[in-house]
Amino acid sequence: MQAVELYNPNTPNLHLILFASTYSLSEDVNPLNYQLTADDFIVLTQADGQLFYALDPSTTTSLFWALHRLAHYIMKAASHKLHNDPSILFASEGYIPQFYFDRINMCQPDILTIQDQVFLNPLCRYTTRENLSAWYCDFQTIGRLTVQWIQTAQCQTLQLGAGTGWNWEACQGLRLEYPECHLITTGNAEEGGNDSFADDASEWSTEGLDGWSDGELMSEMGEGEGKEMVLHPFESTYAAHYPGFDTFIKQPLIYNG
């Protein structure tokens, strides 16, 4: 319940509170809420002394990029089933039929009209400081209104169901995925998987066969189909005993002791 107090200039009770700024860091890096400062302007002095101004390229690019992404988000939600077919005007040029907006009882957002007419960033030019500030604020307003439009359209789509043709979840999956490639080694990456694999292979090729003759290796393999042994054509013991034997003629290998 509110109470009425009598004001006395000798003992004023103003109920003052500490000043708290509502401008946060997230807003400072958000191009839709960013407030221009003197550091964002580039000054060009003409020969006659007249001054022209331009905005910093990063400042203009970030805002124009945000507007493009908002328009792209809306178009993908409407053309989620057709965006893979470049022959359809709906998909190739981002055209959305009016009946799509009628289904959710909403008007087409202004950002789509601007997107069709503006191809170059209009903020990248030299003019007066007042013009740049006004244009920048106007584009910010369009962006913020677009965010509100998307939020309202999402609620309308949720209430009306899937028959509207809008699919806002499809926009969440349009990201570039990077395949994972796994290197198979005998050790882990911290222990140097490639080195351990090379060391183990070298150890197996030398120490693993020490003390074994070709006959013993063949007897260990046993008999049966699919159990054939391929010996080195020059370095094996059999090749040393029978240097004239051609291992590439695919004749049976006979062990004569």
Image (cartoon, rainbow, N blue to C red):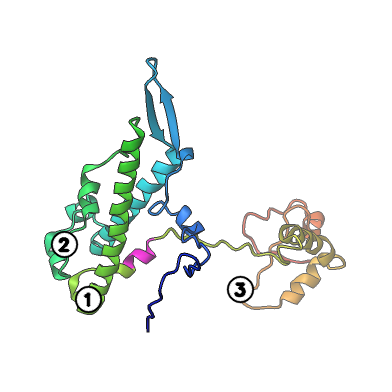
Q: Quadrant of residue 164?
A: bottom left
| Amino acid type at mark 1 | Ala
Mark number displayed over residue 36: none
User: Label 3 sits on what residue type?
Assistant: Gly
The answer to whether mark 3 and mark 1 are in CB contact below 8 A is no
Query: In the displayed structure, does residue 111 sit left or right of residue 182?
Result: left
| In this view, 130 is above or below 79 | above
Callout 2, which amino acid?
Answer: Cys
Q: Position of residue 210 (x, y in %)?
A: 86, 65
Judging by the rendered image, the residue that carries numbered circle 1 is 162
The residue at the point 37 percent across, 66 percent down is 172
Q: SS class of the residue under badge 3? A: loop
Binning the other alpha carbons within 10 Å of mark 1 as few (below 14), some (14 to 19) or many (20 upward) gives few
Tell me the element at label 2: loop
- Checking the image for residue 226, the label placed there is 3
Between 197 and 217, the one nearer to me in the picture: 197
Q: Nearer the viewer, mark 1 or mark 2?
A: 2
In the displayed structure image, the side of residue 189 where residue 112 appears, left or right:
left
The residue drawn where x is 77% and y is 70% is 217
Give the CA separation, mark 3 to mark 2: 73 Å
Q: Is residue 252 above or below residue 126?
A: below
Magenta includes 41?
Answer: no
Comparing labels 3 and 2, the label whose residue is closer to the camera? 2
Mark 1 touches mark 2? (CB < 8 Å):
no
- For mark 2, does the 10 Å Cα neighbourhood hold few (<14), some (14 to 19), or many (20 or more) residues? few
Q: Position of residue 231 (x, y in %)?
A: 72, 61
Q: Which residues are magenta?
A: 170-174
At horizontal 38% and vertical 53% (from top left) the residue drawn is: 32
What whole-number distance in Å separates the C-alpha atoms at marks 1 and 2? 19 Å
User: Alpha-carbon distance for marks 3 and 1?
Assistant: 58 Å
Horizontal arrangement in the rendering, residue 248 relative to residue 190 (left or right): left
From the viewer's perspective, is residue 152 above or below residue 89?
below
